[in-house]
Image (cartoon, rainbow, N blue to C red):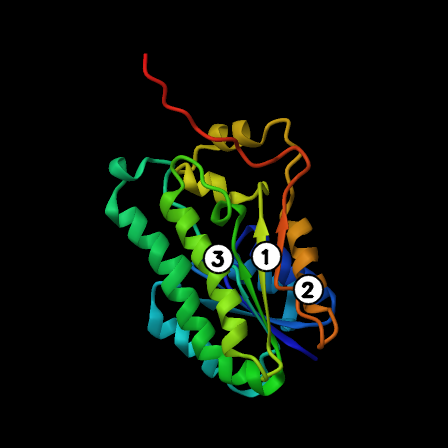
Amino acid sequence: MKTALITGTTAGIGAAAARAFVAAGWKVVGTGRREDRLQALQEELGAAFLPLVVDMRDLGAVERLAALEGEWSGLDCLINNAGLAPPMSDLQDSKWEDLETVLETNISGLVALTRACLPRLIERKGLVVNLSSVAGNYPYRGGAVYGGSKAFVRQFGLALRNDLAGTGVRVTSIEPGMAETEFTLVRNGGDQAASDALYAGLDPMTAEDLAETILWVASRPAHLNINSLELMPVRQSWAGFAMDRQS
């Protein structure tokens, strides 16, 4: 039985991925900050799911994930899903503590965990799946730090493939557009109305759509690498140039 380590499994894409992988016969180590949600997911999925409370900003705890022993010592797939975005403020109006949380979670924690897991992934000729975003490919106002962090994630994965040449380890960047999860709710400080307004009439992607995509990537034959995969709902496209005209 193969084992996947999925970060950020307390909601959204991470929780959906945990369900999809367990249903496909995998064992899943799932991390997150909210213990109650992890325990609820463990009760749902049973012995195939190991819940671990981990904050991606705690680099010591992150690195210890690569030292699991016994039946959980094998690692065939690392899914770097945990991530968040600061409020939609122009950089000059933002709060540093909000930005720092994003940088530590989306970049530092991801790199530390990936680096720590590589020996086991190399041993099993496994797979790294990094959750980037279309925000890393297309700029928008208020997205400088979040988009920058996701551009890093994409480029990190592409360069990591070079480092891992000859090891048999595959690396994929998944770059979703609008998916209706808790992501926007968290970004807006729990404002459900703002989240609902953003997705209204758009028929956005779901967490399950993306979980199925990740599982498909993990199910490809060992000689095939999906370098990057960008997905959007049909009703979303990239924006045109912004103009600031003189009055």
Q: Amino acid at mark 3?
A: Asp
Residue density around tag 3, few if under 14, some if 14–19, many if 20 or more, within 10 Å: few
Q: CA distance from mark 3 to mark 1?
A: 28 Å
Judged left or right of residue 120, residue 233 is right
Mark 1 sits on what residue?
174
> Residue visible at 52% across and 61% down?
38
Q: Quadrant of the C terminus?
A: top left
Q: In the structure shown, which secondary structural element does the residue marked by tag 3 occupy?
A: helix
Q: Is residue 207 above or below residue 24?
A: above
Residue 82 image position (x, y, % from top left): 48, 58
Does the CB distance between marks 2 and 1 fall below 8 Å?
yes
Does the CB distance between marks 3 and 1 fall below 8 Å?
no
Q: Amino acid at mark 1?
A: Ile
Q: In the structure shown, which secondary structural element does the residue marked by tag 1 occupy?
A: strand
Q: Quadrant of the N terminus?
A: bottom right
Residue 246 image position (x, y, % from top left): 32, 16
Which one is nearer the viewer's eye here, 33 or 231?
231
> Residue visible at 52% across and 55% down?
132
Q: In the structure shown, which secondary structural element does the residue marked by tag 2 occupy?
A: helix
Given the current orientation, which residue lies at the most extreme top position?
247
Q: Which tag, 2 or 1, sits closer to the chain's start? A: 1
Of marks 3 and 2, the one in the foreground: 2
Numbered tag placed on residue 36 in the rendering = 3
Q: Which tag, 3 or 1, sits closer to the chain's start? A: 3
Which one is nearer the viewer's eye here, 236 or 189?
236
Q: Amino acid at mark 2?
A: Val
> Residue visible at 71% across and 76% down?
223
Of marks 3 and 1, the one in the foreground: 1
Residue 31 image position (x, y, % from top left): 49, 65
Mark 2 sits on what residue?
217
Query: Can residue 152 be seen in the rendering of this structure?
Result: yes
Residue 100 image position (x, y, % from top left): 29, 53
